[in-house]
Image: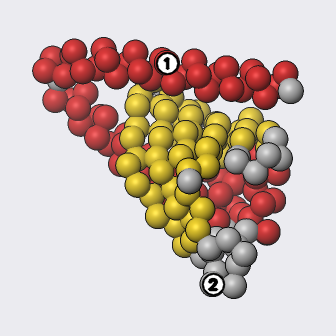
Amino acid sequence: MQILNRWVSLALVLACAAGVQQAGAASKAGQEKPSEQAAQVQLKALLEANVNAEWAAFKNKDKKAYDDLLADDFSAVEDDNQGMRTKAAAVAEIDRSVVGDFKLFAITVIPLDANSALVTYELTLLFPPKAVVRFKRVMVSEVWIKRSGQWKERYYQETHVR
């Protein structure tokens, strides 16, 4: 329970930091250099492609592709009440996955510094016609970090949307 409380606290701190950064960014919007704007556009495209790749890996049951996107110290909290997951546990879920398709909406990328970013989006998962549950909608927050020149997902948090 302590670990969960720490992660919830971390998520809240990151959300607050992101809000502060957004407010600061809004006040500096007219002052950004073209190279900074281009770098932010490039980062958004890169991380958006990574998010699509991670869900495509689930859909295609490609454990290696999914594993390659995750940091070694990756952890996740999903809306299924099963607690914190490690990288190994998250990758193993692919074997049990029945994701038929997925749709991503409203992806935002908020750079936290040169080597980290908060990515948020809405995700709709589509399951096979004979599945007990056909659709699942969640709001997702992910922390991506740049290590050894590669962007890796460090933390994943989802919240069920009704």
Q: Quadrant of residue 126?
A: bottom right
> As drawn, is 32 to the left or to the right of 62?
left
User: Could you say where residue 26 lies in the image, as x and y percent from the top left?
Assistant: 24, 21
Q: Quadrant of residue 104?
A: bottom left
Quadrant showing the N terminus: top right
Residue at mark 2: 129
User: Could you say where residue 141 lies in the image, as x and y percent from the top left?
Assistant: 55, 39
The residue positioned 34% from the left and 22% from the top of the image is 22
Q: Do the numbered discs 2 and 1 sit on residues whose CB atoms are within 8 Å?
A: no
Residue at mark 1: 16
Farthest-out residue, left: 30
Q: Quadrant of residue 144?
A: top right
Q: How far apart are the alpha carbons under marks 2 and 1?
A: 40 Å
The residue positioned 50% from the left and 28% from the top of the image is 116
* Amino acid found under the numbered disc labelled 2: Pro
- Label 1 crowd (10 A; few <14 / some 14-19 / many >=20): few
Q: How is the image coloured?
A: secondary structure
